[in-house]
Amino acid sequence: MATDGFRVSLLDVGPVNASVICNDTDVGFVERTIGGALSLSHVLVVTDDLELMRSAGPERRMSIVASGLSDVPVRFDEVRSRLGLAAQDLDGCSAIVVDMRWGMGSVSAAANFERWGGQCDRLVAQLGIPVISVYKSELLVEDQLLAALRGHSHFLSPSGAYSNPYWLPPDYLTGASLTKQAQFLLGRIVPEYAGLALDQDSGENAASGANPGWIATRKRITPRSGNDDIWKIRCFGRLRIYLSDGTQLQWDIQGSSPKRSKTLFACLLQCGERGAKSDELAELLWDDDVAQEVKRSRLHHAIAMLRKTLGGARYVARTGEYYSLVPPSGTWIDVASFEQLCQKAKILAKTGMDAEAIQMLDAADRLYTGDLFEDMSPEFSDADCLDWVVPRRMWFKEMALKVLRDKAEILRGQGQLREALACCQKALSADPACDMVHAEAMKIFHAQSRPDAVARQYRLYRSAMAAVGASPDSDELADLCRKLMQVDENKRI
């Protein structure tokens, strides 16, 4: 295996599920990464990079196939079957190398990365050859990196192959108690601990780690079984929960009120581990004309229906007067990834890595498919008792506009003025009165030496503000307009 000119012999690695995390910034980094492996009989490269696929000539000792991992939804069983057949068709295939950049096209990369590790384990067991997943470090946000760490039993680096102490076999990931998982990990790190008895029966409600007995949960916090789903929760636009097979959770079950079930779920999701008080939830869902006893009775029914909708009582916990959401282990939420992508883009842009920053911004832009919980009924989202939607909705919308503005600014610096202007136009279609985007558009027109367009853009800003019954908060845009037009006038002189 070659990374940055060094080699690791795959002959010494054996049939392992390994990962490579590299910092190569060239689009052909996968090809160069496997350069040292080409001395083996044959390498199967899995990628959706058309440029890399075109670059492979018949003289290379590798075959390249499309991954199918970029499909939406990803069907991992089909991908694994396809790759297994492709490897078996190669005479003397000695390794499968997977280009993991497909994750940047997936809005739920973290959840998919973790599931991918289990598919690699099964391929290794089936074929008896290494499966090596190559990640580009600059394109990983924190939860994606952690998912990649959990998914592979070994790391490959220029200095050799290393056992991954954080890896769990698929059976332990999906079918063992947390106690047994901890016991397995301890045994990997410290061999003497392999037989340590952590799973002694001390009573159903005995304290276990961070789970004291006064919380009404079982001693063993049940992990997902092989048949359990990992949720992918989309909060931008319509509230949606996608299950492992790509289907959406259905809210309109018999006996429930879909509007109230979705509102209850969204509110508990936003409240996090602390949860929300039952009285607050009742006030949110029913108006003041309903008696308190009736509200409490209706809330109990609504909670029961939500539990039924989600697939079990374990997903909504009650502790005293508080209800809280308990999503399955491995659940992915778009708002969390969105914030991480924005932060990562900011860091990359500050360090001059503009191309990588744009990829982060593009991923964030794909995630933002509409206002937070935009299908929430106003009677619930605008409720006075819990100010839980509107402030967050406004904050995320501003962040989404900044994503487009920041991308436009980078593109303008690179001289890609048409593409930069398209970003501004997209942002202004969402918020015609956004002053920071109008300012960026004026700078783009200035870069095109179009003072007339600079002035027109400022007039559009004034008109948009008037349309919403507002006046400009400051004279900054007026000053910018005069400054840019003055510079253009001086150029003509």
Image: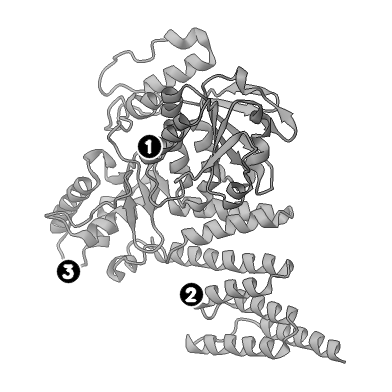
Classed neighbour count for the residue bearing mark 2: other residues with Cα under 10 Å, few (<14), some (14–19), many (≥20):
some
Residue in the image at 16% along x and 54% along y: 253
Q: CA distance from mark 3 to mark 1?
A: 40 Å
Check contact, mark 3 vs mark 1: CB within 8 A: no
Residue at the farthest right position: 493
| Percent coordinates x, y for residue 214 in the rendering | 30, 30
| Percent coordinates x, y for residue 213 in the rendering | 31, 26
Name the quadrant of the C terminus. bottom right
Q: Is residue 319 visible?
A: no
What's under tag 1, amino acid-wise?
Answer: Ser
Q: Is residue 454 rendered to the left or right of residue 256?
A: right
First reached walking from the N terminus: tag 3 or tag 2: 3
Q: Nearer the viewer, residue 196 or 317?
A: 196
Check contact, mark 3 vs mark 2: CB within 8 A: no
Residue position marked by numbered label 3 in the rendering:
289
Helix, strand or loop at mark 2: helix
Residue position marked by numbered label 2 in the rendering:
430
What's under tag 2, amino acid-wise?
Answer: Ala
Task: Please tell me whether residue 375 is drawn above or below residue 476 in the rendered image.
Answer: above
Helix, strand or loop at mark 3: loop
Q: Quadrant of residue 173?
A: top left
Residue in the image at 51% along x and 55% along y: 338
Q: CA distance from mark 3 to mark 2?
A: 37 Å
What's under tag 3, amino acid-wise?
Answer: Asp
Residue in the image at 44% along x and 42% along y: 112
State which mark lies toward you, 3 or 1: 1
Task: Please tell me whether residue 99 is drawn above or below residue 165 in the rendered image.
Answer: below
Residue in the image at 60% along x and 78% along y: 435
Q: Is residue 16 rendered to the left or right of residue 477?
A: left
Res 329 label: 1
